[in-house]
Amino acid sequence: MSSPAALLQPDASGSRLTSRGDLTSFFMQLAADIGADSYMLVAIVHDQDRNDARIVSSNWIFDAIELIGKRLIANLALGPLTVAPGVRPKPLVAAHAPDAGALLTGEEARLLDVLGHAEIYSLRLNVGRQRVFVLFSAAEAGKIDLAALMKAQIKCCYALSSIPQLIAAASMQDPLSDRERECLFWVSEGKTTDEVAVILGVSSNTVNSYITHAIQKFAASNRAMAIATAIRSGII
Amino acid sequence: MKHAQVKEAAAALFNDQRNPFGAFSLGSETHHAVTIPDAVRRCRWIAVDINASAFGLYFVSPSPERARLVACFDSDYPGTAVATKFISGANGEDMVRHSRISTTPRWWADDGAAGSRQAFQQLAWTEPTAPLAPGTNGIAFPVHADRGQLGLVVFMGSEIALSDETLCEIHARSFALFAAVARIRPGDTGRTRSISKRELECLKLTANGNTSEEIAKLLKLSVHTANQYLTQSTQKLNAVNRNQAVAKALRLGLIE
């Protein structure tokens, strides 16, 4: 009988993911290939001044996520540990973490160790303009193959590029209409209401109403904040 | 020339330069501050490793309506190859749109010879595309740098040797190369003066929806000073108003 991992393999060509199930099996297989025990795929959503982690896919036990907290996961992903593709990754070894300083407390490091994440690598993935993060971890330090990890990072980018809708869904949904998005874009380019009105061939009142709607949809307090929210979520 | 011969000849020629820009040893390439000639040399080494005869590195312009590739260098450096004229012209437009939504390498085979096409067709995760330069074979790797710059590293040749094994490694090296180049060339923003920490703080608070009065209160400044910081950062970013300054700072990755 073939192994569960083989059964879960994406389609025969192995070069396109079509469902969440494919994504899970892809990451399970990849983690096994590089000597990791767990993986976690995280998207970061900016909510005003806070960074929120959205877990897209993971085989961490539920308790571990609850105990460690999404705030810490967001910090790990956005912290100095994370490397871009092509850069030699550095592990976070839970046993040495208290020396690592601000990233996590001794208590949190012990928790990670107990929960089977003695060694964690955090990698940045680029899917076009979108950025997501993947954490690979192993129950004992030194188990993960570094050379394989660096190649795996690129493979993750490929795999996620084949299902962009999944990443888009994990990031913020685009609530704007075409006209609202267009108006907001021109405002972000420094155009005034009157200028946008000329560009789009509508009246200034219409432009203002589009922008007001966009501000309301983002629950923003003014234009600058609406622009910032739209850019952060990749809408404009 | 066969791949092995080229490699041998190149090794003999450049042997002393092989380090630190040569062999791919776990990201060791990344941390070197490079100049453009260094980057060209590094790129040439990647090209030699896959038996490509030409290469080029291009930036994707950040503005959504300008879908052109901007050449940084190619294998004819300090001159410009003919292929680059096609790539940075209309032929590159589709590739720009692709690289904004995907990191998948795209290849083309247009010179009639079978060599590269066979290698490309066997690659998982890659996709075929219209030729970036007519009469050539090549593969284009979308790459991204820390501050959100997008780029494309292109290799061309009639007998390119690539396998699933080496594809990820070559792409990783292209990423590292582009990150190094992007650090010396901060994109086509014309940003010359650096923005102070205080100015960035004010911009960030503006992006979070705070007014000048609120910023002044939060940072314990006078409203006048807060406004001054914002005006200065707007000027330094070459923006016409605060809205554009916030947008530019976010797109450049100066604020999160």
Image (spheres, rainbow, N blue to C red):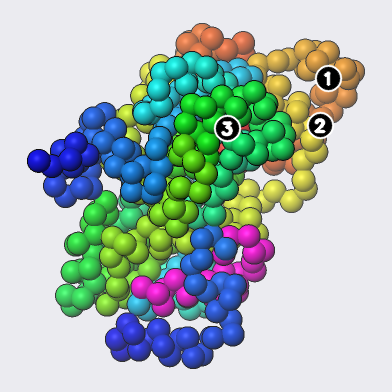
Above or below residue B37? Residue A144 is: above
Q: CA distance from mark 3 to mark 2?
A: 26 Å
Foreground pick, B163 / A196: B163
Q: Amino acid at mark 1?
A: Leu
The numbered dot on residue B219 is 1
A236 falls in the magenta region: no
Q: Which chain is home to disc 1?
A: B
Tell me the number on the disc at residue B198. Answer: 2
The answer to which of A92 and A176 lies nearer the viewer is A92
Element marked by disc 2: helix
Q: Mark 1: which secondary structure?
A: helix
Circle 3 sits on which residue? A76
Q: What's the CA distance linking mark 3 and mark 1?
A: 27 Å
Residue A173 in the image: state x and y as whole percent.
40, 20
User: Do the CB atoms of the residues marked 3 and 2 lie less than 8 Å apart?
Assistant: no
- The residue that appears at 47% across and 21% down in the rendered structure is A64
Q: Residue at x 65, y 36 (%)?
A: A97
Residue type, label 2: Arg
Lateral position of residue B201 relative to residue A4, left or right: right
Q: Position of residue B254 (x, y in %)?
A: 66, 38
Please name the predominant secondary structure of the magenta segment in the image.
Answer: helix
Where does the magenta region start and end? B29-50
Mark 3: which amino acid? Leu
Q: Residues within 10 Å of mark 3 (few under 14, many from 20)?
A: many
Q: Is residue B44 magenta?
A: yes
Chain letter for mark 3? A
Give the image location of residue B30, x and y in percent.
Answer: 58, 60
